Amino acid sequence: MTSATRGSILASVLLLLLAVLEAGLARAQEAAPVAPGDDQPSLMKLLARHGSHDLEDERWNAYGQFTYIYGTQLGFLAPYTNAGGSINSLSPNSEQSFTGSATLYLGAQLWRGGEVYLVPEIISERPLSNLKGLGGAVQNFELQKGGAEAPTLYVSRVYLRQTVELGGSRVEEESGPMQLGKSYSSRRLVLIGGNFSILDFFDKNAFDIDPRQGIFNLAFLTYAAYDFASNARGYSYGGVAELYWDKWAARYGRISPPKYPNQLQADYQLAKYYGDQVEIEHRHEGHGGGTVRVLAFRNRENIGRFADAVAAFERNPQDNATTCPGFNYGSNNPTAPDLCWARKPNTKLGIGAFGEQYLVRDVGVFSRGMYADGKTEVDAYTSTDRSLTFGVLAKGSTWSRPNDVTGGGYNFGWASPSHVAYLAMGGIDGFVGDGHIRAAPEQALDVFYSANIRRSFWLAGDYQRITHPAFNADRGPVDIFSVKVHGEF
């Protein structure tokens, strides 16, 4: 069976299951008529109407999603590709990519304030050029490092959350994935421990729109320069503490990095190797409402510095990309430095800010930017050292399609001077390295429209233009067209 056939089969299975679920939802709606103003009742709401579930004080809930994204990269101009034996160029030829994912979100209350969440997930994928050649502007945010076309089942999250009420007014949290429908104090302490994505709690997506309903490109999921510690799938073990105080919130988290950069195996020595992050958030209601956040991270990991790799090569040219006996990315360039000769316990720092503001009802703008020190290799996220993003998102209520979503954005990503110097000598990191480089900011334009069809389905189209892929003005621009089918229950 070919890889394309496996991808098509997975897509067909996902669509068939969605059709079955939607049919069941339709039958439930016939038995429980839609309340006025309730455009799209969820399965949990329908259960509540039958008296079997209390959405205002949930003891348990269950949600799910299915997403299939298919993209085509057009051919582009490139005077060289993988020069000198380097291996991390994006192919200049036309390519196709896909991801298919299915997720089940389970939540339950254990005791007063205590909640547990379990999230199994399955994914199949084919990235462009084996996920090489883009610094941060990866065209599909669902792509995972080391993923395969054969569907892979794993537990993405299993964690315990404890809430300690501290007074204030009551805040209603609606039932949803990884959130029981509950009433909490506006002043509370929340403690989380287990396996999760740090993006479940830090730098949440603009306007609380599910990423699978928003902009396709990975550069818009969070700060492209936020090298948050995680395994190759984007998940970590660790703990988070959140303090909510009316319109303010403060968070601290310590999570596990990968044992080797960008690999699946985690390092559980949280006293020795770790990723720390701190975030301060303020929500305001004036001028339509909005949010401002500041986030800083500090990673202590076994990673290499670009300057150290260059110095090792200059001292002894035998310490090059083809001779390292330890973990390396497999470059075939004997005239280039390699990070494997420089790996040791190092610290990586970064700080960023995010802001979102509603302009009118269901239409808002957002921006985020981060400056990382740029001294060390990517360990867990993208090769970007500095990033800046602008975007707009809107729901279709203005044109009488309240469940449609549209928007777009523009992202800039930069490599630091020491990173560029290393790449210019033919070095590679986990994702980029063309063998040569004429440095320029990697830029990504992404515009999309997601149309709601038949209650729980969305069909979306997307266009992206990526300029200076891998921070290299010698190559590109790259045009990518994508479609997405998404369903929820």
Image (cartoon, rainbow, N blue to C red):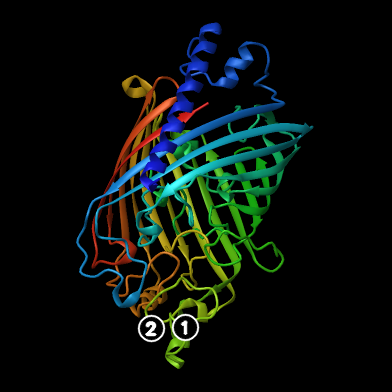
- The answer to whether residue 367 of the structure is visible from this angle is yes
Q: Earlier in the sequence, mark 1 or mark 2?
A: 1
State how far apart marks 1 and 2 are (Cα). Answer: 8 Å
Q: Which mark is residue 437?
A: none
Asked if residue 201 lies left or right of residue 417, the reply is: right
Q: Residue at x 24, y 64 (%)?
A: 475
Q: Residue at x 45, y 60 (%)?
A: 382
Q: Amino acid at mark 2?
A: Pro
In the rendered image, residue 344, in percent from the top left (x then y), is placed at 59, 77
**Residue 405: quadrant of the picture:** top left
Please tell me whether residue 129 is drawn above or below residue 188 in the rendered image: below
Who's the residue at 45% across and 36% down the image? 67
Most extreme residue toward the bottom, as rendered?
A: 315
- The crowding category of the residue bearing disc 2, from other C-alpha atoms within 10 Å (few below 14, some 14 to 19, many at least 20), is some
Relative depth, front residue between 357 and 210: 210
Residue 182 at x, y = what percent? 67, 27
Q: Position of residue 358 (x, y in %)?
A: 42, 35
Tell me what residue is drawn at x 60 percent, y 62 percent.
Answer: 257
Q: Secondary structure at mark 2?
A: loop
Q: Are marks 1 and 2 in contact (CB under 8 Å)?
A: yes
User: Where's the N terminus, which quadrant?
Assistant: top left
Dot 1: element: loop
Neighbourhood count class around disc 1 (C-alpha, 10 Å): few under 14, some 14–19, many 20 upward:
some
Whether residue 214 is visible: no
Q: Name which residue type carries label 1.
A: Thr
Which residue in the structure is indicated by mark 1? Answer: 323
* In this picture, residue 110 sits left or right of residue 349: right
**In this picture, is 444 found above or below 379?**
above
Indicate the position of residue 210 as horizontal and vertical percent values. 48, 37
Which of the pair 187/139 is nearer the observer? 139
Which mark, residue 334?
2
Nearest the camera: 167 or 179? Answer: 179
